[in-house]
């Protein structure tokens, strides 16, 4: 592959495995960047990190039906593998793994699945029942298919990252999980494939989400109550933003922090702007 050509696309498990087997026998390290496509600069930051730490980089593109609820946007989720492949030109990606649904789920729904447990029922899990079981099951399958040394995830999906790290630990999966900081647009909005659904006014309204996190960050040295008041002050005044939850959790357990918590904490926001559901997060140090 020359770096100016688009990466090869593998659509079968056998194809991607044989590519990886060859690389492994040559002593190369490998990294997987799991995605659902519609790649943006946030994904490219994951790819860049993968390239820094591994010889072979595989980007998977698979819109996983198992992690969408019946009333969610599975059908509407943007898909354009050719555009994604072009976006990866020059980023040192060895191959794209872009299977069809029946390559991953040949007999329909899987019988054996990974369950996220209690930590998967809060926050995103409460708004999206079954989402994390579906996400963990497909990540376990992708890790089983590719067997990479490393897999790279974005910090924005903080509960996803926590659960994937937990799964890898609890199930003794050998892959190391690498986390890359959220990439933001100039207006502060975290990059997300769903941002393209926002109209101009909605996009302006959505700025309240990063603004609330910034307000929470500025209030962090005054304690948890100040953090909550600061974030809610921004979110309550934001026209067109329907808050789903604002929460502050312990990064090590993803449990809500105690009222007198001091130290590292993660602020989480989920909100609906029009039809589009957005999430964002920031690491705080509550003083
Ligand atoms: O974050 C995503 O895009 C998806 O949840 C993932 C990790 C690719 C699994 O489908």
Image (cartoon, rainbow, N blue to C red):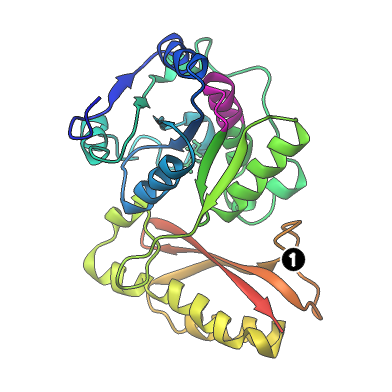
Tell me if residue 98 comes above or below residue 176 in the rendering: above
Residue 75 part of the magenta-drawn span: no
Q: Secondary structure at mark 1?
A: loop
Q: Going by the picture, which residue comes out furthest to the front?
A: 27
Question: Which quarter of the image is occupied by the C terminus?
Answer: bottom right
**Residue 232 appears anywhere in the view:** no
Q: Nearer the viewer, residue 173 or 237?
A: 173
Q: Is residue 130 left or right of residue 37?
A: right
Q: Nearer the viewer, residue 214 or 25?
A: 25
Dot 1 alpha-carbon crowd within 10 angstroms: few under 14, some 14 to 19, many 20 or more:
some
Q: Going by the picture, which residue comes out furthest to the left?
A: 4
Which of the 4 image quarters holds residue 94? top left
Q: Residue at x 18, y 34 (%)?
A: 4
Q: Is residue 158 left or right of residue 201?
A: right
Could you say where residue 60 lies in the image, as x and y percent from the top left?
Answer: 41, 30
Q: Residue at x 62, y 38 (%)?
A: 176
Which of the 4 image quarters holds residue 195? bottom left
Tell me if residue 171 comes above or below residue 212 in the rendering: above
Could you say where residue 51 lies in the image, as x and y percent from the top left?
Answer: 41, 40
The residue at which mark 1 appears reads as 256
Most prominent secondary structure in the magenta stretch? helix
Write down the region rendered in magenta. Answer: 137-149
Q: Is residue 209 left or right of residue 1?
A: right
Q: Residue at x 49, y 33 (%)?
A: 31
Tell me if residue 128 comes above or below residue 19 in the rendering: below
Could you say where residue 115 lies in the image, as x and y percent from the top left?
Answer: 70, 34
Tell me if residue 118 comes above or below residue 62 in the rendering: below
């Amino acid at each position: 592959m020359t770096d100016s050509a688009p990466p090869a696309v593998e659509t079968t498990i056998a194809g991607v495995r044989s590519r990886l087997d060859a690389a492994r026998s040559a002593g190369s390290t490998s990294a997987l960047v799991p995605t659902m496509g519609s790649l943006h600069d946030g994904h490219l930051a994951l790819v860049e990190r993968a390239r820094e730490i591994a010889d072979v980089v595989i980007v998977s593109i698979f819109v996983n039906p198992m992690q969408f609820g019946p009333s969610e946007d599975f059908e509407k989720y943007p898909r354009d593998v050719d555009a994604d492949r072009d976006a990866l030109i020059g980023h040192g990606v060895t191959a794209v793994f872009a299977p069809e649904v029946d390559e991953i789920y040949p007999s329909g729904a899987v019988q054996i699945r990974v369950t996220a447990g209690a930590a998967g029922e809060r926050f995103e899990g409460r708004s999206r029942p079954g989402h994390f079981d579906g996400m963990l099951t497909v990540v376990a399958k992708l890790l089983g298919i590719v067997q990479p040394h490393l897999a790279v995830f974005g910090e924005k999906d903080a509960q996803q990252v926590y659960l994937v790290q937990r799964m890898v630990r609890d199930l003794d999966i050998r892959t190391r999980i690498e986390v890359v900081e959220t990439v933001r647009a100039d207006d502060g909005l975290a990059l997300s494939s769903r941002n393209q659904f926002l109209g101009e006014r909605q996009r302006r309204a959505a700025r309240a989400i990063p603004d609330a996190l910034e307000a929470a960050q500025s209030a962090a040295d005054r304690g948890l109550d100040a953090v909550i008041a600061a974030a809610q002050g921004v979110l309550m005044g934001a026209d067109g933003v329907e808050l789903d939850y604002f929460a502050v959790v312990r990064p090590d357990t993803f449990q809500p922090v105690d009222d007198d918590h001091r130290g590292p904490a993660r602020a989480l926001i989920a909100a609906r702007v029009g039809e589009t559901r957005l999430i964002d997060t920031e690491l705080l140090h509550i003083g």
